[in-house]
Image (cartoon, grey):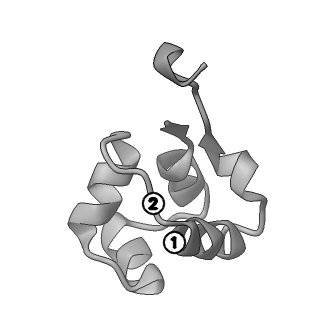
Amino acid sequence: MKNYVRDKRMSFGMTQDELSEKLDVSRQTIISLEKGKYNPSINLAFKISKLFKCTIEDIFIYEEDEKDV
C-alpha cells in the first residue's frame, strides 16, 4: 500500500520522533510506514488522518494485487 505519511509529516514540520509520540507508536513504526513496509491498523490509520486533518484515503492508497482480483 502506498502512503503519503512522510509528505504529510514534513508538511506539518514534524520529525519522525514527534509523530511517533503524538500517535503513541515507536519511531520504527513510523519508519516502516513511510517505507511502505507496514500497513497500519484501522485505528492507527484513523489517528493519522485525524492528526493531519484529512481523510484516510488522502494518506493511504490501496493497490490491489492481481491475486486479489
SS class, disc 2? loop
Residue drawn at point x = 54 percent, y = 25 percent: 68
Kind of residue at badge 1: Leu
7 over 27 or under it: above or below: above
The residue that disc 1 covers is 44
Horizontal arrangement in the rendering, residue 16 relative to residue 2 (left or right): left
- Disc count in the image? 2
The image quarter containing residue 27 is bottom left
Residue 18 point in image, percent of width and height: 39, 77
Residue drawn at point x = 42 percent, y = 51 percent: 39
Residue furthest out toward the left: 28
SS class, disc 1? helix
47 over 22 or under it: above or below: above
Kind of residue at badge 2: Pro
Residue drawn at point x = 57 percent, y = 67 percent: 42
Circle 2 Cα neighbour tier, 10 Å, few/some/many (<14 / 14–19 / ≥20): some
Residue 38 point in image, percent of width and height: 34, 50
Residue 57 point in image, percent of width and height: 73, 48
Horizontal arrangement in the rendering, residue 41 relative to residue 34 (left or right): right
Q: CA distance from mark 1 to mark 2?
A: 6 Å
Circle 1 Cα neighbour tier, 10 Å, few/some/many (<14 / 14–19 / ≥20): some
Q: Are marks 1 and 2 in contact (CB under 8 Å)?
A: yes
Which labelled disc corresponds to residue 35?
A: none
The residue that disc 2 covers is 40
Residue drawn at point x = 73 percent, y = 47 percent: 58
Residue furthest out toward the top: 66
